[in-house]
Image (spheres, helix red, strand yellow):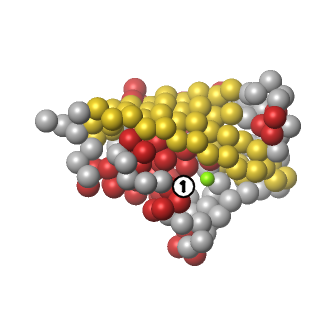
Amino acid sequence: MFRIGNGYDVHALAEGLPLRLGGVRVEHTAGCIAHSDGDVAIHALCDALLGAAALGDIGLHFPDTSAEFRGIDSKILLARTADLLAEAGYVIGNVDLTICLQRPKIQPYIPQMREVLAGVMGVALGQVSVKATTTEKLGFVGREEGIAAIASALIYMPE
Ligand code: MG
């Protein structure tokens, strides 16, 4: 029994904030404005996993109105999401993440992101794909006003 889910998230950028993407600190002059640590990539991934299991979304489980989640490391949200799926009897097949940003180039960080995300979800490296794209300077991403992330997840319930 295979199930798929998708996730999408956007955060605005502000100068001087730390930038965290895919569980990794990325060197940049700006970072995401958020209630949590602003890891837009992990947020999209959590939504893809929750969506695949029809377990709602990240806002339902980790509300940004709750003090508990202020400044929280998004890796904790991903770990809790993986636990929710496991409790419901699901196993993660694979995930695929696309991070849309104009700058900086994040290619050098991708191997580490894959390793970190795989570790948090308790899956093998080969089950985690991370990709990056610019939007050719178009739109809010191109103007460097924000970062977007899109994720897909395939999960299944073992026989
Ligand atoms: Mg978010």
Residue 137 found in image quarter:
top right
Q: Is residue 41 left or right of residue 128?
A: right
Q: Amino acid at mark 1?
A: Ser
Q: Is residue 102 left or right of residue 119?
A: right
Residue 157 found in image quarter:
top left
Q: Residue at x 58, y 36 (%)?
A: 150
Q: Nearer the viewer, residue 154 or 101?
A: 154
Residue ranking furthest to the left: 159
Q: Residue at x 52, y 36 (%)?
A: 151
Q: Residue at x 67, y 40 (%)?
A: 148
Instruction: Provide the secondary structure element on which disc 1 rests.
Output: helix
Q: Residue at x 73, y 35 (%)?
A: 101
Dot 1 corresponds to which residue?
74
Residue 62: % across, % down: 50, 63
Q: Is residue 83 left or right of residue 58?
A: left
Residue 117: % across, % down: 47, 41
Q: In the rendered image, which quarter contains the N terminus?
A: top left
Q: Assess mark 1: CB under 8 A from ligand 1? A: no
